[in-house]
Image (tube, rainbow, N blue to C red):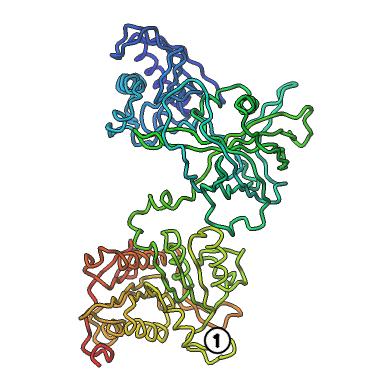
Amino acid sequence: MGDWYLDNPDLLKKEIKELKNNGISVEVNTDASSGVTMECTIPIKNTLGIEIEEDLGLSIKFPSNYPFFRPEVSITSTFTLPRHQNPFGKNLCLIPRPTQYWNVEDSVFSFLKERLPIVLSKGKIVDQEEIGNDPEEQAEPVSEYYLSKTNIAVLSTRPKLKQKEIPANNSEFSFLNHGYINIKYSKDNSKVKLYYVFQVKDKYYPIPKLDDNSDLLKIVISEWIDSDDESIAKFPHSGFLRNGKICKTKWYQINSLPNLLNKENKYNWLINEITKNKLQLPKKLNIHTQDFIINNIVGLVFPEETIAGTIDWGWVLLINGFITKSMGKMLTPKLPNTLVLPIMSVEQEELKARIPKSASLVGKTISVIGLGSLGAPSILEFAKNGVSKLKIMDFDFVDTTTSVRWPLGLDYAGSLKTSALKRFLNNNYPDVEVEIFNHKIGSTDFVSFPNENEVLDTFLDNTSLVYDASAEEGVSNLISTLCKYKKIPFIAIEGRRGAWGGIVMRVMPIANKGCWMCLQYSLYKDKKIALPKEDEKGGIQQRGCGDLTFTGSSFDLQNISLAGVRMAVSSLSEDFGKDSWDIAVLSMVDDNENPIPPSWKHMSLEINSNCPICNA
């Protein structure tokens, strides 16, 4: 398979002909490394229906697999737009980024004819109210054009700025506020590579680059302090980068990011402006990576478009230093360079914006029993979706052979499942409080597992919902009974051998509803509810293991885990009651045991006349 213009030269000829037939001049450049580029000129009097004061120069660059993907159109003349145009590459935002907005049947000319007049018109609009009222508009954050892609991750919570009013557009650069930031960064950065440097004759050309073979330099802004020495933001997770190094430097609130970053030597220019305004300078640092010495870190806060029609405060981190290595050799002299890095927000409001239906987990505690191939993935989902606290109970440890369907891999082998999950959650979802219970319910080993009833009282105390993934009848019987008496919502999930099916059920503390035992009678005694099929040959025993286990892949079993989490979220929601079902039975095979897409049957949990608990 070759590039499109090699495999389909007639298409290239057709595109050129159509442009020329409509009065657009075309010069074509083809290169094996960069594909096809058309240099075009649209005359003042044109067939596109656009009004221009001078001939408009365009550069049209084609992707290798045109027409499956759109060409990129850049303006080469002096004409510029305040919006919908990259200030550096001059490429135009003719359509949104997702590929579904590109019509593969379009020719270049028809694409330009439809979209160019719209962009040239809308790109001139700067009135935020008019932009916000246009449903086709989306925000264009100015910082995105300047960001460096390299192996540094910066995390922070948003500072509560005193200067909230957005300044009017002003060509003159100015400072609005300033203060200190306390920074914590990862210790050993000797394997972190930030640049790709290539040499042409006697010149070196550095490019900030993500490198698969590099470690990551993690930076946390642990606190923002304003010019009045007041703390205006603190990183909420004190344990994150627990062993990191700490330093202090400056942040500045400015009226324009482009006015600074468009300068040729942006960092030295900033230092001169800071000195002219008699402000405190950034601290000198000495942070070494594999190929870069960081001398200075500066926080910048500035106005930018955050949603269409709304200007708010954006932020970046400016890192200044020297490139020290190229292809394993020392550079002489060292190359000064400046990185502009995005700051990733840990603000709860921004994290939760993507998952509005998970709001019912905020402030809730969920107690989970059984941390196997169903329970452990469920715990990760609860954490992702913002549960406030997890109480997790199990007695087993992580075995290498279970890693094929347990969510954490070899790095956790030999750990107790409770400890492994707590460590992972503390590192990755530190907002979630995790309390562990290393206990085997029903054991007579009172040395290893003492005080069972005290443990259960603590496990069930002040919990919003109990989630049973133990797949142990005795455990489910006991815990569901305790939940019934304590009026705690109870959910149980289980899978079948071969992962051919499973069951998800809940018991809510509501009158005239059945219980876990009612379901057992409906499944096994009077068989009002059909059991899902299971693989009769799906029981196995691993070498050196004293217990039987079952076959079944994680991608099948997670249908059950995800349904259980979904049921838990629904059960804690204010909208609970709209669900007309409490039991869901999953089938992954048909009556002839052939694989089928996940098929669910759902029903209400009714009181079974044989249940000794509900009919006591």
- Mark 1, Cα crowd under 10 Å, few <14 / some 14-19 / many 20+, is some
- Residue 598 visible in the shown view: yes
Residue visible at 48% across and 20% down in the picture: 171
In the orientation shown, which residue stands out farthest toward the front?
228
Q: Nearer the viewer, residue 303 or 419?
A: 303
Residue 608 in the image, given as x and y percentages of width and height: 22, 85
Q: Nearer the viewer, residue 462 or 393?
A: 462
Query: From the viewer's perspective, is residue 349 above or below residue 198?
Result: below
Q: In which image quadrant can residue 355 be found?
A: bottom left
Q: In which image quadrant can residue 327 be found?
A: top right
Residue visible at 57% across and 63% down in the picture: 409
Q: Nearer the viewer, residue 5 or 462?
A: 462
Could you tell me how many numbered marks the image carries?
Answer: 1
Residue visible at 58% across and 86% down in the picture: 448
Query: From the viewer's perspective, is residue 612 above or below residue 192?
Result: below
Q: Nearer the viewer, residue 194 or 608?
A: 194
Residue 21 in the image, given as x and y percentages of width and height: 33, 10
Image quarter of the C terminus:
bottom left
- Residue 112 visible in the shown view: no
Q: In which image quadrant can residue 524 be found?
A: bottom left
Query: From the viewer's perspective, is residue 48 above or below residue 137?
Result: above
Q: Amino acid at mark 1?
A: Phe
Under circle 1, the secondary element is loop
Residue 361 in the image, given as x and y percentages of width and height: 37, 63
Residue 303 in the image, given as x and y percentages of width and height: 45, 32
Please name the residue that numbered disc 1 is placed on: 449
